[in-house]
Image: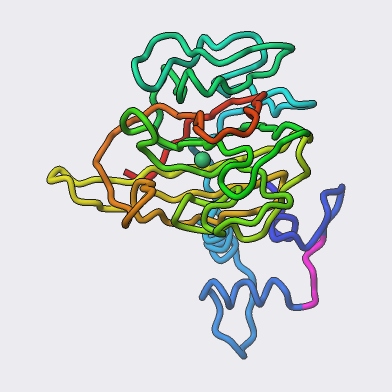
Amino acid sequence: MLALPTLLGLCTLGPACAQPTDGRVTKYLQAAGLCPVGEPCAMTDEKRKALEATIKSTEQWTPVPVKVQPGSGGTPPSDAIVLFDGRNLDAWVSANDHTPAGWLVKDKVLTVVKSAGNIETRQSFKNYQLHLEWRIPQDITGEGQGRGNSGLFLASTAAGDAGYEIQILDSWDNVTYVNGQAASIYKQAAPLVNACLPPGQWQSYDVVWTAPIFAADGSTQSPGYVTVLQNGVLVQNHTPLAGETVYMGKPFYVPYERAPIKLQAHGDPSAPISFRNIWVRELQGPS
Ligand code: MG
């Protein structure tokens, strides 16, 4: 048991810690309701125990957070599910027919094959933290939505482009509608800032996705929320989603429980983009 002055942070740990005489203990006793304000206040064993109990009552000791070894030099944290580490596409399938994913893996880099369509993870997720790196080709051509277009679908709720899309696009020097530029929630929310790097450089998305919650009757109890850092810069801050991404009209929710994560093979004629270092950590969320 620490001496009370040490417990209160009034003394550093050491061989001797005398009772401070500057009135700070009295103030603690008064704050804890153990002495009336403005009157002399003598410490007793009973008050000491009551004060210690008051201090301890706001300490939480369990549950103890699980230890996770953070990644370093581009490696994922120890508890991450690796979705792509440069070796193969075993964690992915075609989003349309669930056959093996037909994108190109070469030199530890994953490149979109537009004719093969969207790909999605074999595994389904609910709430998670995700890391993904993407690169627009240095010699990219085109303009607007036709310049390095891809996308990260936070939940692939059906085939095609169904789900919630965080836009991937060359927005370094390329004008388009702001809720369709890189790091937008497509057609819903522009990014807070444009944190894009030039074509040819690797860029990162770090995403925290809190999935929407649906009632038994299919109504939406809570919207989905997404936080995104692009290249370490906050671009979406716990932004609520109005529903699934739609190209035309207003977003709407379709109830789901768990869903794959999807990457987009966009049909524009510009050169295909590439990905690397994709991992996810499942999170407990509200329920
Ligand atoms: Mg897109």
Q: Is residue 57 magenta?
A: no
Q: Residue at x 38, y 24 (%)?
A: 124
Q: Residue furthest left?
A: 217
Q: Is residue 11 above or below residue 142?
A: below
Q: Is residue 286 above or below residue 74?
A: below
120 displayed left or right of 182 = left
Image quadrant in which you'd find residue 280: top right
Q: Is residue 126 above or below residue 94?
A: below
Q: Which residues are the magenta region?
A: 18-22
Indicate the quadrant containing the C terminus: top left, top right, bottom left or bottom right.
top left
Query: For this rendering, which residue is in front, 32 or 64?
Result: 64
Query: For this rendering, which residue is in front, 257 or 248?
Result: 248
Q: Is residue 19 magenta?
A: yes
Q: Main secondary structure of the magenta part?
A: loop
Spot occupied by residue 10 in the image (x, y as percentages of width and height): 77, 63
Number of on-image labels? 0
Spot occupied by residue 86 in the image (x, y as percentages of width and height): 67, 14
Query: For this rendering, which residue is in front, 19 or 207?
Result: 207
Q: Residue furthest bottom?
A: 38
Question: What is the image's colouring?
Answer: rainbow
Spot occupied by residue 191 in the image (x, y as percentages of width and height): 59, 57
